[in-house]
Image: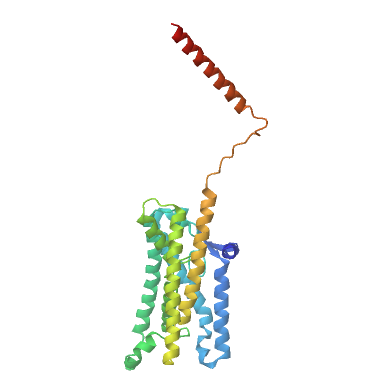
Amino acid sequence: MNLIQRLRNWTMRLPNIGGLGQAEIHSSLLITLSLLSGLIFLLSVTRPGFAEFRTAAVSLPVIWIISLAVRVAAQMLAIGEHSHDLETVVGPSGNLATDYEYLPARHVFAYGASGQVATLGLALLGLIVNAAMIPAASAELATAQLLDLKGGWSSQAWASQIMWVNMFLAALHLLPTVPFDMRAIMFAFFSRKNRNPSEPEVFRRIAKFDSHMAGVMFGSGVTAAALGVVFRQEIVGWYAAVAAAVYLFVASQWESARAEEVEEQYAPLSSKTARHDSGHSTAAYLKMNLDRRVEGAADEFVGRASAT
């Protein structure tokens, strides 16, 4: 639990390198895109089959940044005037901040849904442009060419890269945990399910949901891997399911830790009363004298009543 908190705190302590307007660009975005660009360039140099992707080492990071800008802009437009109060830190997958937790539930849902709609819209645009540029003579290879990631400076290459980058971002944001926007949708759902729920309660519900999803993803990945061994044919994607399961499990622990942190932060302070030493206390002596006085007055009253 402490390791998860330290890892997140260390990640969020990475400096912001500037931004545009209210949006700050996190340094992890440049680190991720630099590593991606270097990996693509290394593959294009070392393997002849990837030579055409040498230009993708430049074009893919540019398309990635543009796609993130469109996604974040759509989210800011969706929440309207609340965008001025929302901290925006753009990371490799989008906004890293979770200030949407303080917005009304319907605005939180609009925030999460609008980002996915914008990303899927860009992916659909790239798909349409790529399909329009496929030669009519190669209709039998239309599906393969439609899903092919192309390199170069042609319009078809840019369209294919826009399609794949945004499809990848949309798939990432289906994970219901930070820093992905499906968590915002789940946060709005659990906040709306019960009126005025406490933040720790919502965090624990998200943690429980992530834990269940981790079990489903891990079981799916292991089953796919076992079927691949039985039928001697590798099923693509089983490793991604296992990796997602591990990430969701870690995320569920982080949500639980955050719930405990919020409870400790807002818990009322316990009042401590000073206890006197029984050897120096006169409470028993005073009580004894008071009892004796009351008993004496009662006996005197009874005596006078019987005399009359």
- Residue 173, relative to residue 156: is it above or below? above
Residue drawn at point x = 43 percent, y = 90 percent:
230
Q: Residue at x 51, y 52 (%)?
A: 263
227 over 217 or under it: above or below:
below
Height in image: 260 above or below 209? above
Q: Residue furthest front?
A: 307
Q: Does residue 89 appear in this view?
A: no
Q: Residue furthest top?
A: 308
Q: Quadrant of the N terminus?
A: bottom right
Residue 2 in picture, x, y percent from top left: 59, 62
Q: Quadrant of residue 46?
A: bottom right
Question: Quadrant of the rendered structure where residue 287 is?
Answer: top right
Residue 247 or 139: which is nearer the viewer?
A: 247
Q: Position of residue 86 (x, y in %)?
A: 47, 56
Q: Nearer the viewer, residue 65 or 300?
A: 300
Say above or below: 90 vs 64: above
- For the C terminus, the image quarter is top left
Is residue 24 visible to us here? yes
All told, the count of numbered labels is 0
Q: Is residue 185 left or right of residue 55?
A: left
- Taking the view exactly as shown, the residue that stands out farthest to the right is 279
**Closer to the camera, 60 or 97?**
97
Q: Residue at x 55, y 65 (%)?
A: 26
Classify residue 44 by image quadrant: bottom right
Nearer to the camera, 112 or 51: 112
* Colour theme: rainbow
Q: In the rendering, at what x and y percent does residue 179 appear? A: 49, 65
Residue 207 location (% of width, % of height): 46, 63
